[in-house]
Amino acid sequence: MHEFFTASRRRRQSTRRHLHHGKRAAVVRALTAARLYLGKPVTAPTLNSAAEQCGSNAAYTKAMVTVIKAEDPALLAEVLGGHTSLLKAAAKARKRAALIDALRHAGSEDRAAAGRVLGAAAIFDTLVTPAL
């Protein structure tokens, strides 16, 4: 009976599934980890290559970028603790992350224009007062 099961198995696994773009996936991940550990720069020209270097995928990596940009430590802790799915957390944080990014990158003229359009009282009541 055991001979029937072992006869259908390959003697060794194909290396094809371990290779991605001609490089061993585990070696790429180990290289990334070693660079991080040594404090050396880890560069990735695209989101896809960054995900590949860490053994993740582009959707999860993009979602984590959004959660990080939202700068909400409690939300990040929920995701890391498994209490909230990463994709749901990213969807929840998307507008906040975009707002923070827009405010940080806006010039003084753009911020002044937003103040005129939204009103100083509204900005103070919605941005400053809750943070006090």
Image (cartoon, helix red, strand yellow):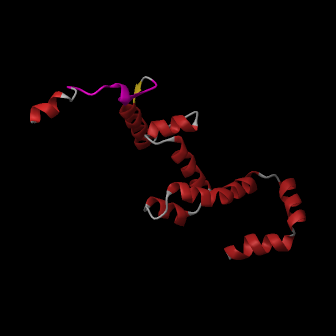
Q: Is residue 40 above or below residue 79?
A: above
Report the front residue among 106 and 17: 17
Q: Residue 86 location in percent, x, y?
A: 51, 55
Q: How many marks?
A: 0
Q: Residue 81 location in percent, x, y?
A: 43, 62
Q: Left or right of 70: which side holds 104?
A: right
Q: Is residue 28 above or below residue 81?
A: above
Tell me which residue sits at (10%, 31%) in the image: 3
Q: Specify the quadrant that holds the N terminus.
A: top left
Q: Name the outermost residue toward the top.
A: 22
**Residue 41 in view (yes/no):** no
Magenta stretch bounds: 11-21
**Residue 87 in view (yes/no):** yes
The image quarter containing residue 22 is: top left
Tell me which residue sits at (61%, 61%) in the image: 92
Tell me which residue sits at (46%, 25%) in the image: 21
Check if residue 61 falls in the magenta segment: no
Q: Specify the quadrant that holds the C terminus.
A: bottom right
Report the front residue among 106 and 96: 96
Report the front residue among 77 and 110: 77
Report the front residue among 71 and 2: 2
Q: Left or right of 30: which side holds 2?
A: left
Q: Residue 84 location in percent, x, y?
A: 49, 62
The image quarter containing residue 96 is: bottom right
Q: Residue 108 location in percent, x, y?
A: 84, 55
